[in-house]
């Protein structure tokens, strides 16, 4: 893996910008779209560029081969469930709060990795980082302007979505030799299969009368924040490696707060800013003591 150049730093910043902007777009999309339908349309538009990429690079898509089961499970745990939970959660809280909560994925991932992997055990310093990060989240619960009895359940749902991302990440490790493009495309196709009947049965999307604003936000989520972002992620992983790519976790909550404040007129309190600093410190300590392999 090469040392990061200007173009690599630009792409990392762009990825953080795109993923950080996804939360206020999710918020806008929830004004017109129910969660299953929102997640379904998002993954349908994401699957198109991924499918075309595999065809262009002549990569075999193993979603429906005899080894389909792990792709189906990951599609459920890493895409269908978290996308739905995040849509439900973000509908009831500030978009920047969702971005901050989602940034804790490395910490919950470290806890799960300790129990379900052989070479990712929690060390003393890593446990300190996890504790600090979760203290940052706990600190938010003392800010009644941001989290109160009317929306705390949405906070917990969003955290659950983040946890499923971690579960999906652990499961994906079992397919690390199958190629990023194949795994992501295959699991995305399976997420479409899971979400389609749920949307049709529980939400009757054909009866929706969505606003243009919500529709544009949803198209952005599918084409840019999912499809294009994953392609950028592939490039970063290939050229710079996993450790460099995971630095995007620092950028997502920062961009999320900026977009929430300036574009959504969401209230930013001093407790939010302190919590953001604490959470990012926890992420830094966890990542600094992550002994995972970069390949």
Image (spheres, helix red, strand yellow):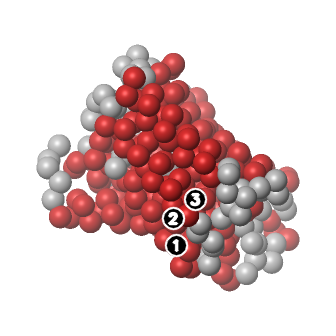
Quarter of the image with the C terminus in it: top left
List the single residue furthest toward the bottom.
212
**Mark 3, secondary structure of its residue:** helix
Q: Are marks 1 and 2 in contact (CB under 8 Å)?
A: yes
Above-or-below relation of 208 to 185:
below
103 and 190: which one is in front? Answer: 103
Q: Which residue is located at x 59 percent, y 66 percent? A: 269
Q: Which residue is mark 3?
A: 271
Q: Which residue is mark 2?
A: 256
Of callouts 1 and 3, which one flags the residue occurring earlier in the amino acid sequence?
1
Above-or-below relation of 271 to 110:
below
Above-or-below relation of 260 to 66:
below
96 and 237: which one is in front? Answer: 96
Residue 34 location, x and y as percent? Answer: 77, 62
Residue 222, visible in the rendered structure = no
- Label 1 and label 3: CA atoms lie apart by 18 Å
Binning the other alpha carbons within 10 Å of mark 1 as few (below 14), some (14 to 19) or many (20 upward) gives: many
Residue 233 location, x and y as percent? Answer: 36, 53
In screen coordinates, is 199 left or right of 18?
right
**Mark 1, secondary structure of its residue:** helix
Q: Which residue is located at x 34 percent, y 32 percent? A: 290
Residue 115, visible in the rendered structure = yes
Above-or-below relation of 132 to 92:
above
Q: Which residue is mark 1?
A: 259
Of callouts 2 and 3, which one flags the residue occurring earlier in the amino acid sequence?
2
- Label 2 and label 3: CA atoms lie apart by 16 Å
Frontmost of labels 1 and 3 is: 3
Binning the other alpha carbons within 10 Å of mark 2 as few (below 14), some (14 to 19) or many (20 upward) gives: many
In the picture, residue 117 is in which quadrant? Answer: top left
Q: Which residue is located at x 43 percent, y 35 percent? A: 129
In the picture, residue 5 is in which quadrant? Answer: bottom left
In screen coordinates, is 178 left or right of 103?
left
């Amino acid at each position: 893996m090469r040392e990061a150049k200007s173009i690599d730093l630009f792409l990392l910043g762009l990825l953080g910008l795109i993923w950080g902007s996804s939360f206020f777009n999710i918020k806008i999309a929830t004004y017109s779209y129910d969660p299953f339908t929102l997640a379904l349309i998002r993954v349908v538009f994401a699957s198109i560029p991924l499918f075309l990429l595999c065809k262009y690079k002549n990569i075999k898509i193993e979603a429906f081969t005899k080894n389909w089961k792990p792709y189906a499970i990951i599609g459920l745990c890493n895409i269908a469930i978290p996308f739905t939970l995040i849509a439900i959660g973000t509908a009831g809280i500030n978009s920047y709060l969702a971005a901050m909560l989602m940034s804790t994925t490395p910490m919950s991932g470290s806890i799960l990795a300790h129990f379900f992997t052989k070479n990712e055990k929690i060390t003393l310093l890593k446990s300190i980082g996890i504790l600090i990060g979760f203290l940052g989240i706990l600190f938010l619960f003392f800010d009644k302007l941001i989290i109160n009895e009317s929306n705390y359940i949405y906070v917990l749902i969003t955290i659950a979505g983040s946890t499923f991302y971690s579960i999906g990440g652990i499961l994906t490790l079992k397919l690390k030799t199958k190629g990023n493009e194949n795994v992501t495309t295959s699991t995305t196709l399976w997420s479409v299969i899971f979400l389609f009947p749920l949307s049709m049965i529980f939400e009757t999307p054909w009866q929706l009368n969505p606003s243009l604003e919500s529709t544009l936000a949803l198209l952005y989520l599918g084409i840019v924040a999912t499809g294009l972002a994953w392609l950028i992620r592939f490039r970063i992983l290939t050229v710079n490696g996993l450790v460099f790519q995971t630095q995007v976790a620092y950028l997502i909550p920062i961009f999320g707060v900026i977009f929430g404040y300036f574009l959504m007129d969401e209230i930013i309190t001093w407790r939010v800013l302190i919590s953001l600093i604490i959470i990012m410190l926890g992420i830094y300590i966890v990542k600094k003591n992550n002994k995972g392999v970069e390949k």
